[in-house]
Amino acid sequence: MEINPVLLVVDMQNGFCGIGGSFDQFGFNIQPYRAIIPKVRRAIDYMREKGAPIYYSKAIREASGIDLIDRVHKIIPDSRRERLKKMHLCIRDTWDSDIIDELTPEPEDYIVEKRRDSVFQDTEFELWLKALRADTIVFTGIDTYVCVESTIRDAFNKGYDVILLKDSIASRNTKHHESTIEQIAEAYGIVLNSDDFIEMIENKQIILTKE
């Protein structure tokens, strides 16, 4: 199988994963997010070595609150409410919105700023994929059943092949995490451990091509 891939690191930001970040301050359990950092780091380093482009997505909000989902929806679960008085999360140009130090992007990497779950929605992500003639997205990051899953569904329906590194994604909800992995494997792409993915490349079962 020959692929022209990019590696996507979804929302590995201080606000979600960082000690002292917003989620940590809210009292959320960020350990599932932090546990995958070494695996994501290895995937980044390996794919960079192989010449594959590295993309990072960043969930951001404006300090004014103009882009909060509360401004759009009348019907919204309480867990998704974003009132700034209660949740100062990943505001643009703050430490909270930065990628965690353990995964700091290199100058040649691509940073996609997004305001909704999918990395495709209202961003330049697909434009850049087309410019590189990429055909496959290798997924890492958080949260499994929200932003990762939303982006995978969009990727598949836009014609991109999907590889999900299941030990390099995480959620604070184990049930939803496992359900998403099952759904992706059944309907959207290949689900692999990162070690198996690397082994398949080294054994030429997966061949990385460059247009």
Image (spheres, rainbow, N blue to C red):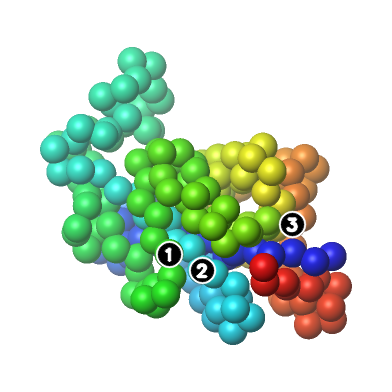
Query: What label does residue 191 carry, if any?
Result: 3
At a point 72% along the width and 77% down the height, the residue shown is 198
Q: Secondary structure at mark 2?
A: strand
The disc placed on residue 54 is 2
Q: Earlier in the sequence, mark 3 or mark 1?
A: 1
Using a 10 Å C-alpha cutoff, classify the residue at mark 1 as few (fewer than 14 neighbours), some (14 to 19) or many (20 or more). Answer: some
Q: Of circles 2 and 3, which is in front?
A: 2
Find residue 47 and report its horizontal and vertical position in percent.
Answer: 60, 76
Evaluate if marks 1 and 2 touch, with contact meaning CB atoms under 8 Å apart: yes
Q: Secondary structure at mark 1?
A: strand
Residue at position x 27%, y 51% in the image:
90
| Quarter in which the N terminus is drawn | bottom right
Q: Which residue is mark 1?
A: 110
- Residue 169 appears in which quarter of the rendering? bottom right
Residues 68 and 18: in front is: 68
Dot label at residue 199:
none
